[in-house]
Image (tube, coloured by chain):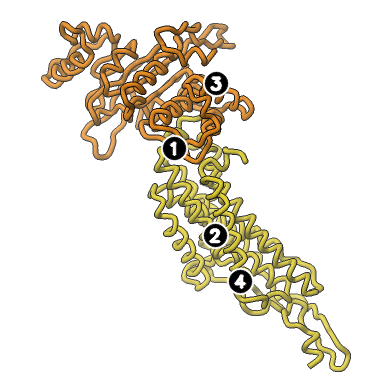
Amino acid sequence: MSPTLTAWVGSRRALTAGWASLLVTGVAALFNRGLEWAGSWRQAIDWGTGTTVLVGPVAAGLACWTYARMRDSGFHHVASSSSRGFAAWVAPLLWHWWQASVVVLASVALAGCVVILHGVPAVPTSLGIAVEAVAVLAAQVSLGAALGVMTGRTWAAPLAAVGVCLLGVTSTWGLIPGIFDTGGVTGSLAGEVFNVRVLVLSGIAAAGIAAAALWAVTSVLARRPRLMTSLIAAAIVSGSWGYVVLGSGDDRYQLASGPITMTCSGAAPRVCVAADTPQPRDDAARQ
Amino acid sequence: MDYRRLSRSHSSIERPEPYQTFNLLSGEEDVMEVRVSGLRSTYRGRSWTLEVERLQLTDGVTALVGVNGAGKSTLMRHLAGALRPAVGRVHVSGSDIYGHGRAAGLRQVGYLPQEYSLPRELRVQTSVTYAAWMRGVGRRESKALAGAALEAVGLSARARHRVHTLSGGMLRRLSLAQAMVGEPGFLLLDEPTTGLDPEQRAAMRDLVAAVPDGRVALVSSHVMEDVHTLARNILVLEDGAVIWHGGIQDFCERFGGPDRSAEVAFLTLLSQHRAGRRPRSPK
């Protein structure tokens, strides 16, 4: 593997441990309430992206650990005096983001496989919400990295994980705008659809948070490339706008405007349920 | 340049031709030169302001000396492009390293901070390859240059070893290889002999002294014996100001007493400066 990306993420053992902790967390988050989402594409995908609530904090802890080591070693001085120093400094952040994204997207894919195995007929139409989840992961990982840079202490890693996890909890409870609320709905989504406006705003706000954290991560360098400075500033401005607009309190789900697709089973009685209901209709027909 | 020559004792090495580049615009050869103008920075917790009105470093090793807290490491960071000064410019081979010419200027800089370590779990060769890549060298070329740099510091046999298996002296040599890889024209070494035993120090001194003519090296040290052996020029800092910049021989002759000792010269200069007598620096 290229040392460009992984030079600072630890030994092969640490790398394996990182992957293992993320995968175990992803699986645990996906199946922590069994398979109650297995009959609905929408709910399954929502649970897949909902793994971000736990995978993100673990990735944030790993990023914090990596950047605390980098800061403590004085690497920022050498990075500042190298022509590819900015890339070298940011590469571990991209690595941790990519790693977490792979796990969350794999969780979505796994949830999809389970749905197919349950014989649910409707096709997935809501995969776009995975983009929002990846943006939220960027924010979570960047916040962890920023804490690592600011403290320069590896003991801050668990604090970063807990702090980012609390952001998810407070987001879900509505104490802060729902940026870090990425799914895991417990009720049926029959007759409901994802609120695209809220998801887009949430993604933009998350990208803004990621950019602000990236600003902090790179603040120890002597200079950022001009293009990067402009991109980060633009992301912060649009993210702030997204954050403010998102504060209006709209939910990420809304009632479907069109007719609800039904799926039926049996003859007498004939049981029809909404296509996105996780209820096993054959059992209902038999009863 | 053949790096193998650098690993021999500097007294016996054959000095290569001065490092020069060809300027396509002017059609003239550019000799490596570092220029500082109007540099000024203030730091929290320090009673002084680092001020360097004008400084020019030309080829050969220049020793940077001063008491603890005089501003040596801070000046090194400014010159290495690692710390932007409040005002002022630093030009490396004509490129402003805090301005438009930053990328080109930084390609010429090899910097070894006082406290710096690459991840201990990396292989020795990988850590130097990584340093070369950071300096803008292509991936394939990085490997070849890393091999040459390791050979120069006598660590070729350890190329496949992990960094954490090296001794303190080897680690310092590895750091030197990281700073030297890619043959930067301007080498900054912040106390490269700190923490080394006398034998390792002598070996390190030989390596640093082998910097070819035509390149600029700035080496900070507290050990005046190292300074005397290594340097062609000396730069003395006190409370963030340059109080002497000139040839080492001249410095020792003027202030070093009958033995022309660099240590005596340094202490004499400091006491004269603190007493309010300001000896006029030749540069």
Between the C-alphas of marks 1 and 4, the distance is 40 Å
Image quarter where the C terminus of chain B lies is top left
Q: Chain of mark 2?
A: A
**Residue B208 position in % (x across, y down):** 40, 18
Residue of label 2: A56
- Do discs 2 and 1 share a chain? yes
Residue B216: x and y in percent read 42, 15
Numbered label attached to residue A75 = 1
In the rendered image, the vertical position of residue A197 relative to residue B250, given as above or below: below
How far apart are the alpha carbons under marks 3 and 4?
Answer: 55 Å
Location of residue A48 with respect to B161 vertically, above or below: below
Q: Could you say whether the residue bearing mark 2 is in a helix, strand or loop?
A: helix
In the foreground, B45 or A197 = B45
Q: Which chain is yellow?
A: A
Near-viewer residue (B35 or A237): B35
Instruction: Give the amino acid at mark 4.
Output: Gly
Judging from the image, mark 4 belongs to the subunit labelled A
Dot 1: few (<14), some (14–19), or many (≥20) neighbours within 10 Å?
A: many
